[in-house]
Image: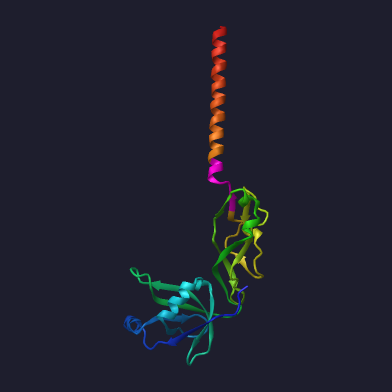
Amino acid sequence: MAGEIPDLVAEARTGTGKGAARQARRNGMVPGIVYGGESDPLPIQIPFNVLLKRLKQGRFLSTLFNMQVEGEDDVRVICRSVQRDVVKDLPTHVDFLRLHRNTRINLFIPVEFINEETAPGLKKGGVLTVVRPEVELMVTAADIPEKLVVDLDGLDIGDTVTISAIELPKGTRAIIDRDFVIANLTAPSSLLSQEADDEAETEGEEGADAAAEGETEGDAS
């Protein structure tokens, strides 16, 4: 489950529109907006280096923050959009949604695999094919899971892991309403190639036997 909610310090931004946003960027800030709930939208700005560091830490779009703005009450928010420069791929604007503890939202939660060393299929050289490295869930703001854990202990080649094999937090459910695949253990390519060669060889032998039988029947006649 999610741990302590991290703080995110921002400043109230005076003025709106493209001109004010450009000025904020010239001052080393990234403009943004906080919306939702029962309050009016609040224009904000966050120091560029602070935001960039947060983005590099990962999971920015699925992390619940306690936003602190001088002169405003602290509020829980989650980022819903990060606009980036098309050339430099650096943040140019951010949108945050206000949340209450019981607010339900859709988020992509990363999947972590454990006990690879005790999976018989991997010991045999099998390959773990991850179909969904993250899963979209409907979660409650107060109980956002940091990750979903898949235990590979005991899994062999040919086994499949579906969403039903993962214990989801209470009040959380997958958006897709079916037992979809998260990952599977497949045979190594070398084994698949050997099996294909063996099959081709078997078919060749059967073809040769059939041809030999045909020649024998022809000689007999």
User: Farthest bottom residue?
Assistant: 71
* Start-end of magenta stretch: 184-192
Quadrant containing the C terminus in the rendered view: top right
* Residue 20 in which image quadrant: bottom left
Residue at point 66%, 59% (across, down): 165
* Residue 22 percent across, percent down from the top left: 32, 81
| Direction from residue 171 to residue 20 in the image, left or right | left
Quadrant containing the N terminus in the rendered view: bottom right
Asked if residue 39 lies in the magenta stretch, the reply is: no
User: Farthest top residue?
Assistant: 221
Asked if 32 appears above or below 147 in the picture, the reply is below
Please state the total of marks drawn on the protein image.
0
Q: How is the image coloured?
A: rainbow
Depth check, front residue: 87 or 113: 113
* Residue 123 percent across, percent down from the top left: 62, 51
Asked if 178 appears above or below 38 in the picture, the reply is above
* Residue 195 in which image quadrant: top right
Residue at point 48%, 93% (across, down): 71
* Residue 2 percent across, percent down from the top left: 60, 74
Asked if 151 appears above or below 20 in the picture, the reply is above
Residue at point 56%, 42% (across, down): 191
Asked if 5 appears above or below 218 in the picture, the reply is below
* Residue 115 percent across, percent down from the top left: 64, 59
